[in-house]
Image (cartoon, grey):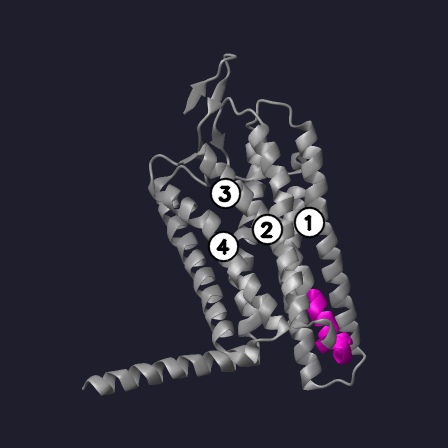
Amino acid sequence: MAKLLPWNETSVTEFILLGFSESHEVQLLLFALFLLFYLVALAGNTLLLITLAAEWSLHTPMYFFLGNLSFLEICYTTNIFPCMLASFLAEAKSISFSGCMAQFYLFGSLGGTECLLLSVMSYDRYLAICNPLRYATVMSRGVCLCLAAASWISGFVISLVSILFMTSLTFCGPNEIDHFFCDFTPLLRLACSDTYLFEKVSFFLSSTLTLVPFLLTVVSYIYILSAILNRPSTAGSQKAISTCSSHLIVVTTFYGTLIAMYVVPAADHSLNLNKVFSIFYTMMTPMANPLIYSLRNREVRKALKRLVGRKFASCWKEKNGKM
């Protein structure tokens, strides 16, 4: 849908999200699959948040940042997947112009915040393992709050530049986005006005928000692994290496797909490949983070068991009291 502008151009008022396939059977299959992914990510991160909030023993810097990450993942997936799931079942797969711009802004803001949070979390682990005597002093409550706030504020403020540029572009048709959400490259290909300056600015912002945190994260983990390997071999050291390796795999997958999408020139990959990459950082990492970062952690598992045990005991006492 479009409306006529005074200078005889048309302004798009809504976009059509083409998604993955036109086949009704395939769309139903994808609906079930992505609904399962979304529910798993939502349940895992919500359960982790509740556990971290309820257990005083987990009120430490590491788990504070994990709580921020879990809350971010809930917002991140909810920004994209309910709309995408609805489009699988609806005949008209449209999204309003304002809704598309809001989704684009939230996606960029939350993605940038996650890049910064992951970097902060790696620095926290570096201090805890490589400088344990200074850890409590450096990572005070005030410092943790400032680092988390800086990550959130920076992500949302930096993304303001992108949304201001995007909303200043003219979209005069066609209005079909070859993607399952309002992403940068598919939207840019629909613009009727000159996008050269926007592309250069976006490249700089994307590089800053992905490459710099990624390098800081990798350097932190190199120091962490080096410190662990230089210690006498114990079961604890082997477990720490295994955990750090798992963290690094998830982090590398997240940063790697983002860099491939937003730092590598768009002409180097197709829109279909964009969709595949997008699945990794919009769904796979939000699903994996609760498992990799926390549920494999013995302290979190014990806290979760205590929480569930208290809940069952409370329900049992309430039920017996009514009898």
The residues tagged by marks 3 and 4 sit, at their Cα atoms, a distance apart of 11 Å
- Callout 3: helix, strand or loop? helix
Mark 1 falls on what kind of element?
helix
Instruction: Kindly give the residue lying farthest to the right in the view shown.
Output: 230
Task: Residue 53 in the image: state x and y as whole percent.
Answer: 49, 72
Q: Residue furthest left?
A: 323
Question: Do tag 2 and tag 3 residues touch (Cβ < 8 Å)?
Answer: no
- In the rendered image, residue 92 lying in the magenta stretch gets the answer no
Instruction: Using a 10 Å C-alpha cutoff, classify the residue at mark 1 as few (fewer than 14 neighbours), some (14 to 19) or many (20 or more).
Output: many
Look at 60% across and 55% down and name the residue there: 152
Instruction: Give the class, few, some or many, for how many residues have Cα within 10 Å of label 4's Cα (few <14, many ≥20).
Output: some
Can residue 164 be seen at all in this image of the molecule? yes
Is any atom of residue 277 visible in this view? Answer: no
**Of label 3 and label 1, which has the lower sequence position?**
3
Label 2 with label 1: CB-CB less than 8 Å: yes
Q: Quadrant of the C terminus?
A: bottom left
Residue placed under numbered mark 2 in the picture: 111
How far is mark 4 from mark 2, CA to CA? 10 Å
SS of the residue at dot 2?
Answer: helix
The kind of residue tagged 2 is: Gly
Vertical placement of residue 210 versus 232, above or below: above
Q: Which numbered disc flags the more N-terminal residue, 2 or 1? A: 2
Q: Which residue is mark 3?
A: 103
Quadrant in the picture for residue 120: bottom right
